Structure formats: C-alpha cells, structure tokens
Amino acid sequence: MENQKSQNHVGMVAVVGRASVGKSSLMNAFLGEKVSIVSPVPQTTRSAIRGILTDERGQLVFVDTPGVHKAMSNLGKVMNRLARASVEGCDVVLLVLDATQTAREEDLGWITRLLREEIPVFAILNKIDDLTGEPPADWPAVWKKVAAEKGIAKEPEWFRVSAMTGEGMPELTDALFAKMPAGELLFPEEMLSDYPRKLAVADIIREKLFGVLREELPHSVAVWIETIVEKEDGSWDVDAKIYVMKDSQKGIVLGEKGRLLRKVKRQAEAELAAIYEHPVRLDLWVKAEKKWTENFWLLKKFGYVA
C-alpha cells in the first residue's frame, strides 16, 4: 500500500443520528472489532470516538458521536453540541435511522440540519434484521417532506443495513470508498482508533455498569481512570473511580454485599483482557460527587469536553 498512496481513497465519515439507532454498533461493524461501547441504555456514547478502517482501497475514518436527545443537564448539552459539530470537516455524513420505528423529532432535526450542509449524506436504515415487513416509516418520503418544507432540493443515498448481521455492510463500505477523494493515509495502517487509552478503559467499565444497572442509574454514573500500571509480566493494574451523584446511589452501584460491583469488575476485566491481549486487574472505588453532570471541570476531566 505504501507505493500506492496517490491511489488511496481517504476521507472522514461522521456517524450521526438520534440516541439508540445503532451508531456505535454500525461503526464496530465497519471495523470488525469493538471500538465504541454498545448498550441498550440511550446516550451511552459521550465522546466523539474515531474508528479507522484501512484496506487496499484506502482509509475511512469514522467519527461515532453521542445521540442527540432532549438535554436535561450540562452533560446532555455538551453531548448534543459535540454531535452537531461532528459533521464539520467530514467528507460524508452517515445519518443512521432506525428502520423499525417511525420518525421522531430528533430524526427530523437531523434531516433539517443535513439539508443545509453541502456534505454528501448517506441515509442508513439500520436494524433491518428486526423487520418483519416494510419499515413503519417511509423514510424517503419523510426526507422529501422536510426538504419541501425547507425549500431545499437535496437527496441522500439510501442504504438498508443490519449492523448486527452485516447485511448490506459490504455495499455501504464500497459506496463510501467510491465517494472519497484520492490522498495519503491520515493514520498509520495498523491503527484502529486514536481514542485515548484511559478513556477507552473507562468506557468499557461504564458499559458493564450500564448492563447491570439498566435504566436505574446510568446517566448519573461516570468512570475515571486514576492510574494504569504496566507490570513486568505484561499485565495491567488499573485504579478506577466510579462517580455517582448521591451517597444513596453508592449502595445501588455496590449491590448487596458488593455483588453487583464484583460482577462489573469480572465482566470488564475479561473484556479488557480480550481487547488488550493480556491480564487486566481492576481496583474499583465508588465516589459520590453532587451534580457532577453540571461541573465543567469534571466533564473536562472525564473527556466529555475538549
């Protein structure tokens, strides 16, 4: 590939849409590996995460973004601003839509925003594996209606895919490479993501917490990695703090006799060991920090504010 740099098709791809449409699952499907955490809980992704796909055709750099939602805190507002700003400087925008649901206010907001952008748009009907018939929404008609209301003549390219089964993914990937300009690689061939290691480890722990807490507490939870100590035997010792907003929430995270937190620790250690290919030992502490979602400096510390 080094001798064919001028023939590489290289570009940035913003992956946008409302919460819970499968943006992180889609990016992981492109890469064939887990880069962005996935959870049934809305607004799991809190940072812009770049995943890098490099093959003989060139390089696609995907930017997975938080799902736009009705913000109830500074954290929510930061996530929404990050998502909306993600399209700037990208070569293609993937607007991910849930093929199993009707259009929502946030979907219409994204369509309106992207109609005003000059960037090419690929509209992705995701989760087609969950469909038993035609989509409950005629998404092309929804786009046309919004475009007519705004008086803007712009059409996206439409794709039907399943991030879970891989259906439609090869065709979508081919179309993305074909859309990109020729140029030199933006990142080394072997790099899968430029996401900082501490934030990546924190995200895995947070994902496991979301998995056991479900809707009970997740948006009051943040994880900060204090230290990662690389031992001589190749293993890591990781010291992490789990932040909640009230003292009463500490007991929920710990669970009866600490069982819930031990379950999270086991699951996170196993996944981190698989990702980094060596043992990872976690030391988890729970700390109450009132209104951390409103604290700019803590949001910055956690990597949610640049």
Image (cartoon, grey):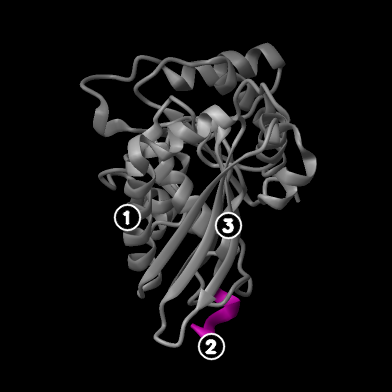
Q: Amino acid at mark 1?
A: Arg
Helix, strand or loop for the magenta stretch, by majority = helix
Q: Nearer the viewer, mark 2 or mark 1?
A: 1
Residue on which the image places disc 2: 3
Q: Can you give x and y, in whole percent of width and height, for residue 169 in the image?
A: 35, 49
292 and 1: which one is in front?
292
Give the quadrant of residue 56: bottom left
Above/below status of 133 relative to 74: above
Q: Badges 1 and 3: C-beta atoms under 8 Å apart?
A: no
Asked whether 163 falls inside the magenta stretch, the response is no
Q: Which residues are magenta?
A: 1-7
Tell which circle, 2 or 1, labels the residue nearer the N-terminal end.
2
Residue on which the image places disc 1: 266
Residue on which the image places disc 3: 199
Q: Residue at x 30, y 31 (%)?
A: 128
Q: Report whether residue 201 is seen.
A: yes
Above/below status of 73 relative to 163: above
85 and 111: which one is in front?
85
Q: Can you give x and y, in whole percent of width and height, for residue 275 in the image?
A: 38, 66
Tell which circle, 1 or 3, labels the residue nearer the N-terminal end.
3
58 and 178: which one is in front?
58
What is the residue that sits farthest to the right in this orientation? 296
Q: Secondary structure at mark 3?
A: helix
Q: Secondary structure at mark 1?
A: helix
Q: Amino acid at mark 2?
A: Asn
Q: Residue at x 47, y 82 (%)?
A: 231
Q: Can you give x and y, in whole percent of width and height, for residue 226 in the image?
A: 61, 61
Taking 131 as reference, is 25 left or right?
A: right
